[in-house]
Amino acid sequence: MQRAVDILADKQKSTEHVRNICVLAHVDHGKTTLTDCLISHNGFINQKQAGSLRMMDFLEEEQRRGITMKSASIALQYTSQSTSSSSPSQSTLINVIDSPGHVDFCSEVSTAARLSDGALVLVDVCEGVCVQTHAVLRQAWEEKLKPCLIFNKMDRLIEELKYSPFETYERLRMLLHEVNSLMSAFESEKFINQADTFLSAEDKRNNNINSDNNEDVEDLAEYLDDHLDMTDAEDVFSVERGNVAFASAMDGWAFRPEQFARLYAEKLGCSEKALKKGLWGDWFYHPKSKRIVGKKLNPNGKLKPLFVQCILDPIWKLYDAADEYYSGDKDLPTLAKSLKLTSISEKELTQSNKRMTLLAIMRSWLPLSSAILEMVVHSLPNPVEAMPFRIERLLYPSDSKIAAYDDILKCNKSSDATTVVFISKMVAVPLSSIHGGVREGSETHGDSKFVGFGRVFAGIMKKGDKIFVLGGDEPTEIIISELYLMMGQGMFPVDEVPSGNLLAIGGLDKVVLKSSTLSSSLECPLFGSMMFQASAIVKVAVEPENVQDMPLLLEGLRLLNRADAFVEMEVMDSGEHVLSAAGEVHLERCINDLRERFARVPIRVSKPLVNFKEGITTAGFADYKIGSKKVLRASVERLLVVGDKEKEEEKVDEKEATTAEDEKKKKKNNNALNIELSSISSSISGNSGDTFLDDFEESIRLGFQLACERGPICDEPLDNLKVTVEFLDAPIEDNDEVNNNDDDEQLNSGQVITFTRDVIRQAVMKSNPRLIEAMYLAVITTTSEALNGTYAVLGRRRSDILSESIREGTGVFIIHAYLPVATSFGFADELRKLTSGASSAQLVFSHWKELDIDPYQKLGEDGEELTDNVARDLMDMVRKRKGLKVDEKVVKVATKQRTLSRKT
């Protein structure tokens, strides 16, 4: 392995022959299996182990659950199969980052996407475009990655669903159209938002759109139409352009139609270029004229599409011959000889296990690694080509005048260029995985060591370099003493890493928390924040079983916070240490890491704590009095109907980057409270309003923020409100409640903070307050026999059923439902138990939903006591947890006598 690492490290110097890619997909769509197949190309693992070894899933928890939880990188070398004598074959270094598919680990997808220039997006041809497929496509689009599409698990269509070649072709066309429609929707959404922003600015400038600015509006409309026409004219994924592949990662084969174009061009007597275009779409081979014809010359529909005839039919024949009930005249060895395969031995062809013979033939005829890596080399950009269109996502335009900005743009690797590195995450790796041992004096934590996983965007990072860590309160200067090339779990030391390559850096424990920008110059632009698909909405309080272990727990929490890019830590006023995670699976892994890797002490974990928000249904106001004098008035009004999906789509609760393009979106999507200080007027003691606004503006802001953080229902954050604060009058000097001092001392900043906070809370209470809860989108896969049990579980957990559909050609049902986060814990386990494992669920954070019942309502419409007030139950639960007063009856039935036995 060390010899291979030395060769790979030498290849890093040729930036034009480097590719940085990540593998993205929905959970269980075959990312890690495909990555294993790519790794086998370099001989790091045996091809027969691909899919079962899961080399990139090196954590024990990953192997146990069978899902990827951490993104990991490996460097591969591939020599392109050049078909032109004028362009000799080139060796390319390909850095592959395998990423998780489960939504709970979306932060790992974000860190992988930030360091990549291209993406391999996998789609299971049986399951189609799923929730996370949509999410990772958006992630790739947001990060300006060039994507390639891989339709995986083709073998399932043959063996499980028994599709014919033509049915398979129709399904593939439908899936390709669906994926391209998604990408087109992202682009259209962006330009419509730009149009809205433009029109809003015009409207604000002119109060309304009138004839004076119709010309500008028409220009914008024309520009938008031109762009949409351009977008529709060229799909992102095109079989003809070579960025779409078809694969079976588990069986180890894949192809692109252009491979068959070279094979069939001579046989059919046509040009390779024409055949390459005709191998997808409505093109047919006419045997009489020996020409490739269109749909018009196939009126009876008797001719098969070339994709079916030339590609799918031969594959289907091989799989049919491997069936134990096959009765055809051509067996597998005969078919293999007709394909003129020279790399397969006679022993493999004559073995008794037909399945193993089939795999040997397919892997020899259509090797997956060659097809996919060839696509990567020819369809995805190198770092130099990628930076011009990626830089607007990575950096702020305002930094373009800085010298380092130009070095990043050009991916400058000269010795006099500013060295710039972005660390996307900190990784805790086992000491045993560091080849050559740990450097003496290097900081370790038990049997683990932290390294920063990142990429060199400019210059050359060398051992011994003095580097500034930027992004904190103050820049920190360090000396780089440990550089590594990440090869899955293994860390191999290297002396230098040039621009455009991935690396791992040791010794950053005390200066980098989660992510950071490193530079050899203080005059360096900071990289924008990464976009996360979800937010940390599930919390638990943790404490040690033994009080004396508290220092170890605190140290463990600190290490966990550094090791996980998404986890959040918080110390409550009560002294509780609260850990926040993206979901139940993420939370479980964090707790296991805390117990077994970082704290290594027995800990107690509370029941899950769920975030809520508070809102209002009507406008209202409240006055704050000092004595008989009304001093302050707060008016609140609603901004948005929470749960209105059409509007909520523009207000998704994401942690978004604040780079150039997203800053406008963040302002628009920001769902925090708003306060308009310009609407505040004051007339206190004869002074002008502007004077008092200047004096108390900061105090009003602080009071407003205090009210925002803790609403009156159960101390949860307020949401979707507009607050207007107004000074009505000043307290008079002879008020009993106010000291008889000078006018300037009658109302100090501390009082204004308290007044503002209290009066806003009072105004909210007078505006029919409501509790707002977080909702998951649950996508449940089940069978017809398990439908009753599935709906029973959903009904008990206050779910809203959205749709039920059956997957084409199968007996599998897909149910979409909204599930409250508060009732989601244990949902997957209960679902599996009641349906005997026939149902599985994927939960993705969707939106915030306002409960349409007053939490303070005690009586129903008939005047009887309301016993099923869900909002009140949730309010009381949160208030009890926080130690707040709860309006709970001690005696429920006063007329009922309890008989106590008297003992003598």
Image: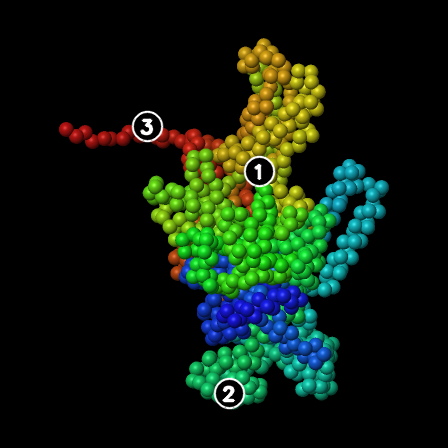
Q: Identify the residue under disc 3.
A: 895
121, above or below 401, in the image: below
Tell me how far mark 2 sits from mark 3, CA to CA.
Answer: 89 Å
Disc 3 residue type (three-letter): Thr
Q: Name the spot of residue 41 as percent of width and height, x first.
A: 54, 74
Q: Name the spot of residue 99 as percent of width and height, x first.
A: 53, 60
Is there CB contact under 8 Å for labels 1 and 3? Answer: no
Q: Name the spot of residue 444 as percent of width and height, x first.
A: 44, 53
Q: Identify the residue under disc 1.
A: 719
253, above or below 823, in the image: below
Q: Counting other residues with Cα less than 10 Å from the Cα at mark 2, is it few (<14), some (14-19), or many (20 or more)?
A: some
| Sooner in the amino-acid sequence: mark 1 or mark 2 | 2
697, above or below 246, in the image: above
Along the line of sight, the residue nearer the viewer: 37 or 160: 37
Q: Residue at x 57, y 53 (%)?
A: 423
Q: Residue furthest top?
A: 734
Disc 1 residue type (three-letter): Asp
Label 1 element class: loop
Tell me how far mark 1 sits from mark 3, CA to CA.
Answer: 43 Å
Tell me how far mark 1 sits from mark 2, CA to CA.
Answer: 69 Å
Q: Identify the residue under disc 2.
A: 333
Quarter holding residue 505:
bottom right
